[in-house]
Image: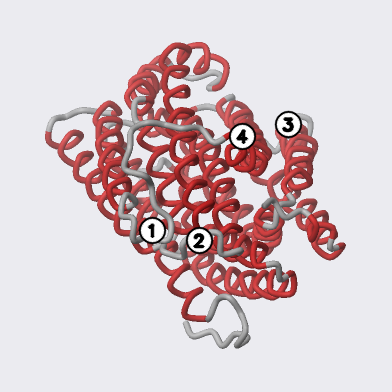
């Protein structure tokens, strides 16, 4: 992919290509291995697949919170780099990793202490077998949360520098460990969800250790200090949280809404839970290029904002949207037409397969046409510092359109388990409209954080 961009731009076509392609490969490996996890566990039982999908929804909430905090650090460090203030940029990276690690410890303890009330309230009506599988998997993966926090922080720091290759290589290593561990423990030792949990714990720990070692090199534009003593910097922490907290609340409420919708789906039985789990994996695969470009958006827009050039912010936002549509369209439909093979790999029953196809139909329509405008534009707004508007808009639309809409579609209108996916498309329509109006208004121009 060769892009000819403006000669005076902060990023050349080569820069964008080198930033985005490793992100695409990284996400592909992550989501593909995650799908293989479910396929491997499906050899145990359909209940085991449902259990992992249920716990993964909680872990997705944790990951979204970490992603929001990492984005906060990336925006601050990126704007400092754009303003050529390297010392403050490095200090931002240092504060970020400590802040996320301590948050991860707190989350780990919370899940260990209150896992049963959480499962009882979130998972809805599930069989005792699914509950037992879920509890084992949740308890083991909870110990991996602090390591996940360190890895997420480090990956964000690398991407802020425009280096997405190192996180990609670490992701390859992590996924190889996870996949190999699953194969050994599930097939070799006859374990079930506990085998998948142990593999996840080992892979995340290895990733955290390696990425920290790499970021201790002082020759890097952004690096950590070689010390275990944490010295909080109140000013930088406030700046990180100024971006990270609204983003975290937004992502957290978004995932909480998905958990409520999962509880809705669970009322339609194990077949519906399994169909929803398969559709979630397929949906993630369809959107890999879009997710990758969205991650690159934070780096590009934050640097342009720090540089003080709003024309370049607008220019690169158009370029990134074009790349997102160009890379997502073909993959989304290719995966859609591969669904018969995917359903065979999951050993899906006839009823589960039919329900899955209905859900995938709705997601493909929404993902191909509306996802970029619904999520890339607000990402650009956040990177420029316009975080409160995006938070309030996202939460309002999530609850008023997707949550309420899903329950109305599922029960009064009788659309059943596919209702959350139909409500998702309606949600995307509202998001696209509101964020386009905000972007065109130019009110985000005076929201620079540093």
Residue 379 percent across, percent down from the top left: 65, 55
Say whether marks 2 and 1 touch (CB < 8 Å).
Answer: yes
Label 2, on which residue? 292
Task: Name above or below for residue 364 compared with residue 35.
Answer: below
Relative placement, left or right, of 396 versus 6 is: right
Task: Name above or below for residue 263 compared with residue 171.
Answer: above
Mark 3 or mark 1: whose residue is earlier in sequence: 1
Say whether marks 2 and 3 touch (CB < 8 Å).
Answer: no
Mark 2 or mark 3: whose residue is earlier in sequence: 2
Q: Residue at x 67, y 63 (%)?
A: 305
Q: Nearer the viewer, residue 122 or 22?
A: 22
Mark 2 or mark 1: whose residue is earlier in sequence: 1
Residue 406 percent across, percent down from the top left: 72, 36
Task: Name above or below for residue 267 compared with residue 221.
Answer: above
Relative placement, left or right, of 199 versus 116 is: left
Give the label on residue 252, or none.
Answer: 4
Q: Residue at x 63, y 64 (%)?
A: 301
What whole-number distance in Å separates the C-alpha atoms at marks 3 and 1?
35 Å
Residue 15 percent across, percent down from the top left: 48, 75
* Eye-nearest disc, 3 or 1: 1
Residue count near mark 3 (Cα–Cα under 10 Å), binned few <14, some 14–19, many ≥20 = many
Give the label on residue 407, or none.
Answer: 3
Relative placement, left or right, of 336 versus 205 is: right
Q: Secondary structure at mark 3?
A: helix
Residue 44 percent across, percent down from the top left: 27, 32
What whole-number distance in Å separates the C-alpha atoms at marks 4 and 1?
23 Å
What whole-number distance in Å separates the C-alpha atoms at marks 2 and 4?
20 Å
Give the label on residue 26, or none.
Answer: 1
């Amino acid at each position: 992919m060769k892009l000819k961009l403006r000669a005076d731009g902060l990023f050349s076509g080569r820069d964008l290509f080198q930033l985005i392609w490793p992100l695409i490969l990284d996400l592909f490996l992550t989501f593909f291995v995650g799908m293989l996890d479910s396929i491997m566990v499906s050899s145990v039982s359909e209940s085991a697949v449902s259990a992992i999908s249920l716990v993964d929804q909680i872990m997705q909430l944790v990951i979204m919170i970490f992603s929001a905090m990492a984005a906060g650090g990336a925006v601050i460090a990126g704007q400092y780099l754009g303003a050529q203030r390297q010392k403050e940029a490095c200090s931002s990276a240092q504060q970020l990793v400590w802040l996320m690690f301590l948050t991860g410890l707190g989350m780990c303890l919370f899940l260990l202490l209150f896992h049963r009330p959480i499962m009882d309230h979130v998972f809805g009506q599930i069989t005792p077998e699914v509950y037992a599988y879920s509890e084992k998997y949740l308890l083991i993966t909870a110990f991996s949360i602090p390591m996940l926090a360190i890895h997420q922080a480090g990956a964000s720091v690398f991407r802020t520098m425009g280096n997405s290759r190192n996180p990609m290589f670490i992701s390859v290593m992590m996924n190889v460990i996870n996949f190999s561990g699953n194969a050994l423990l599930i097939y070799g030792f006859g374990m079930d969800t506990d085998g998948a949990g142990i593999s996840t714990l080992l892979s995340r720990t290895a990733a955290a250790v390696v990425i920290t070692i790499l970021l201790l090199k002082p020759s890097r534009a952004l690096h950590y200090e070689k010390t275990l003593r944490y010295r909080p910097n109140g000013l930088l922490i406030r700046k990180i949280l100024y971006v990270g907290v609204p983003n975290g609340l937004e992502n957290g409420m978004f995932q909480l809404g998905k958990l409520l919708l999962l509880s809705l789906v669970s009322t339609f039985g194990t077949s519906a839970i399994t169909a929803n789990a398969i559709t979630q994996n397929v949906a993630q695969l369809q959107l890999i290029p879009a997710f990758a470009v969205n991650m690159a958006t934070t780096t590009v827009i934050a640097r342009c904002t720090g540089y003080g050039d709003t024309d370049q912010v607008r220019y690169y936002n158009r370029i990134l949207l074009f790349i997102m549509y160009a890379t997502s369209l073909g993959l989304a439909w290719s995966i859609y037409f591969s669904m018969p093979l995917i359903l065979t790999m999951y050993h899906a029953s006839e009823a589960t397969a039919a329900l899955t196809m209905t859900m995938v139909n709705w997601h493909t329509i929404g993902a191909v046409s509306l996802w970029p405008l619904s999520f890339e534009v607000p990402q650009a707004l956040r990177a420029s510092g316009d975080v409160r508007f995006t938070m309030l808009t996202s939460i309002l639309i999530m609850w008023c359109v997707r949550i309420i809409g899903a329950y109305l579609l599922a029960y009064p209108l009788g659309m059943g388990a596919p209702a959350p996916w139909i409500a998702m498309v309606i949600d995307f329509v509202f998001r696209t409209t509101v964020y386009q109006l905000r972007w065109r208004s130019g009110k985000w121009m005076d929201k620079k954080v540093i």
